[in-house]
Amino acid sequence: MPEIQLKLMGSLGRLAGERETRLLVDEGATVRDLLTLLAERYGPEFAGAIFRAPGEVHTYLRAFLDERDAELGDRVAREGGAPAAVAVLIVPGFEGGSR
Amino acid sequence: MTTTDQWIPSTCGLCYGTCSIRGHRVDDVLVKIEGNPESAIGRGRLCGKGVSGIMTLYDPNRVNVPLRRTNPVKGKGVDPGWQEISWDEALDEITARLRKIHDDDPRKLFIQRTTTNTSIRAPMMMFAAAFGTPNSWAAGGGLHCGNGAHLIGGIYHASWSLVPDFQHCRFAIYFGASKGHGAGHVSCTNMQDAADARARGMRLVVVDPMANFAAAKANEWVPIRPGTDAAMALAMVNVILNDLGVWDAEYLAHKTNAPYLIGPDGCYVRDAETRKPLVWDAARGHAVRYDTPDAAALALEGEYEVAGVRARPAFVLLREHVRQFTPEWAEGISTVSAAMIRRLAREFAAEAMVGSTIVLDGKRLPYRPVAAIYFRGSQGHKNSVYNCFAIELLNEIVGAADVVGGALGFNPVCYGHPETGKPWYEPKPGPDGLMITGTWVAPHLPYPIADPKPPTTMSLGGLFPLGMFGPTMASSDQEELWTKFGLPYRPEMMLNYGANSLLSVGNSDTVAATLARIPFIVSFDITLTEFSEFADIVLPDTCYLESLDSRPNVPFIFNHPAGLGEWSWPIRQPVVPPAGQRRLATDVLVELVDRLGIREEFNAVANTHLKLDGSHRLEFGTRYGYEEICDRELKSHFGAARGLAWFKEHGVISWPKRVEEVYWRAFLGVRVPIYWEFLIGLNRNAKRIANAHGLDWDDVWYDPLPRWLPCPSHEVRDGAFDLWGFYYRDTLHTNSFTNENPWLDEASRLDPFSYTIALNAATGRTKGLRDGQEVTLESPHGRRVRGRVHLTETVHPECVGIGGCAGHWAKTLPIAQGKGVMFNDLLEVDWAHGSPVNLNLDTCVKLRIVP
């Protein structure tokens, strides 16, 4: 399984109890899969910050893959090589903040 | 001898209208300010406030050095014992405080900002996101206008607010709105557009307790009792739908959820497989999903057997629902006569010209030249959601939303500059096909609605996902509510930018008590105000004429002119260098970001918010000054050749608007809700959480169809309190900020209304009062203000109107001190006076005159 470097930015780091970690993800896992995994891992308050309703990610949640904006369907792991750097951040939902 | 003589393009900052200006600088001295004719934002016009900015810049009482209080006692009128300190001392202490909070729980930081200077909105919210606190508000404005009108504007128009299509509208009815009369969004452009529209023949009816800036220029003033707009609007909807039988079936069927089938439980009847709402396709003779591509005959009437239940289109429920709201019923609530309501409904329906089209730019488009416009007056109440919802239904039933002649959101669609295609945004369909805005201004989008959850923010926002800001940060029952919901932290620090919440929220005693409980307050200010009396450190800010901002009119849904014409993206730049030790607040924020080690977070947020792309994106680990961030934003949008240096020289870039951008509704496949089905689940879940925490809950606020609900002032039974008090926006002033400007003060002293209490002349005579007499107004809660009455025919006989926000007491504001009346001192700030659906604060109050 590929490994990623995860950074939980802003309030998500507090909710998770850690700001940086490494995670093993399934081959082909998407940003959405990763968010689901994180919600299970870090508990209901963290999940509430990620999901607006079951299966519906808040419009103001943003993920970055190697510092680039990522969509929910983007794969989080690089093909081979070094772990991808994934950052997740809550951005107030105005202007560019909403997906 | 003159050595330099320059006209420098920049942007006004004396209200959030943010018009484009040119400053005339001679030998480093600003001698004059004019409107900038090169920009669509103002089109060369500038109001009296804008011209007076020179007096704000050169105010001799400006703060020029960082200050630290020496007196630990905080209170109204208490001298903080200011001591001058260096910037390093100030930032060292602020950083240490912030770092401790960041390491402990970032939510303990509360961020407060003014609505007057829009340039700080994005930087402060970016800082908050990077720091990790969800706790912030726009003091006063957020509670008085932010939760209702803007929510409805977002849900229906994908915009912060709305105006008539001044170029084509034939009949506009304003409910407590002042679009085009010298204040607010797009102030100067709207003034000219409104004047041109009236000259062209647009009929304007103003429904308002007071005939001031809008009604004075209208064809007709309709006096109304405060907070009863929904009653009148619903009666008009009833007349139009049920007496006249007028509606725009095409619009309702394809642009709203009117055809969605509603089951006996009040919820959508959904497709078993996709869970999408169903509609009845009369051509097929059976129900189909709402987004079935070739379904063209969507039923708005009838009753159908679908999925084992009897179901009816939402439109049927709306028509049935409004039957109870007869004009006679509305007259008893609003004081607007039934005959008047019927006549206005007939005129509105007739002028809508349902079914008509017009050709613009070779495209045949719907033509509905009527608009119902709502804003602060109708929305500043506990019942703001239903007030605005009910008024908006007038536009929706006749299909007059974002079509030619109708009610236009401010620029919900932009396809960008011809050379770059940026900025680009448009609404899109969201859950159940309902519209999601293409861009927004506040912390969360108006739709989709989040599931309610036990609140973890100071505003209790999680439980009230329709609200944007809540009053708890300054409420008298703050601790009770936080305890009730088990909030696991309390505010440790406030970072304030330019807001004077002592004057702008509610009664100052309650606000003062909440501020006094915050251990450490830092405030960016240009002068010391009543708020400063509670600050621990005051940082000397640049005023707008000394400031830099790459985006004073972004997003365009906030303060860019609507309608056809040009797009303009101006910048704000210093017309003179800052004096003393004043620093640009955004530069200070960037320095704090670096000192706190949250650069990666801040740069990530900036990339997202400012839509930086390509080589202009910020690398997470690199430090950028604010000027460079501005440069990158401009290059991201307009190409490498048009960075900050280009904009400093030219001031603004403009390009033509397209018909598809302005009259976008016909081109985009989005729907808006005439039936708020989502309130059913929201109510169920929120009620469960509220009751579990010991909070009473009333389902009546969560009905999917609007009704008129009384504010606390409507339920006062003591007949001694025989007047309704409200405040209005004096066009001479912006919030409480401009009261210290000597030119505006002089104009206010010459104006019979600015500093007085407007009372109906006949009512005043009945009470034995004479014009100019000093009186005391008292609320049922014993709150009192004192001022001179001005007897006038231009206020509802049951009402007193006060220009807001005057009544300063700070000795540090020698021009403003002791002038005018602070209406907000009469307002309660507590749960009972907030909306149980969007947390909006009620701003009408029952009053009596006491000796």
Image (tube, rainbow, N blue to C red):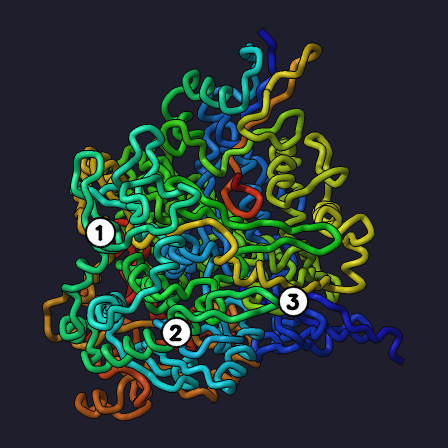
Q: Say which element carries label 2.
A: loop
Which kind of residue does numbered mark 1 sit on?
Trp
Q: Which residue is mark 1?
A: B701
Does label 2 or label 1 sit earlier along the sequence?
2
Residue B155 in sight: yes
Mark on residue B353? 2
Mark on residue B55? none
- Residue situated in front as seen by the camera: B671 or B521: B671
Does label 1 or label 3 sit earlier along the sequence?
3
Which residue appears at 54% of the width and 12% of the height? A25
- Residue situated in front as seen by the camera: B793 or B845: B793
CB atoms of marks 3 and 2 within 8 Å? no
Q: Say which element carries label 3.
A: strand
User: On screen, B705 above or below B266?
Assistant: below
Which kind of residue does numbered mark 2 sit on?
Met
User: On screen, B150 above or below B677?
Assistant: below
Label 3 to label 2, Cα distance in Å? 28 Å
Query: Are labels 3 and 2 on one chain?
Result: yes
User: On screen, B232 above or below B699?
Assistant: below
Q: Say which element carries label 1.
A: helix
Horizontal and vertical percent for residue B757? 33, 81
Q: Which residue is mark 3?
A: B566
Horizontal and vertical percent for residue B32? 71, 78
Query: Are labels 1 and 3 on one chain?
Result: yes
Q: Which image quarter holds the N terminus of chain B?
A: bottom right
CB atoms of marks 2 and 1 within 8 Å? no
Which residue appears at 65% of the width and 47% of the height? B588
Is label 2 or label 1 in front?
A: 2
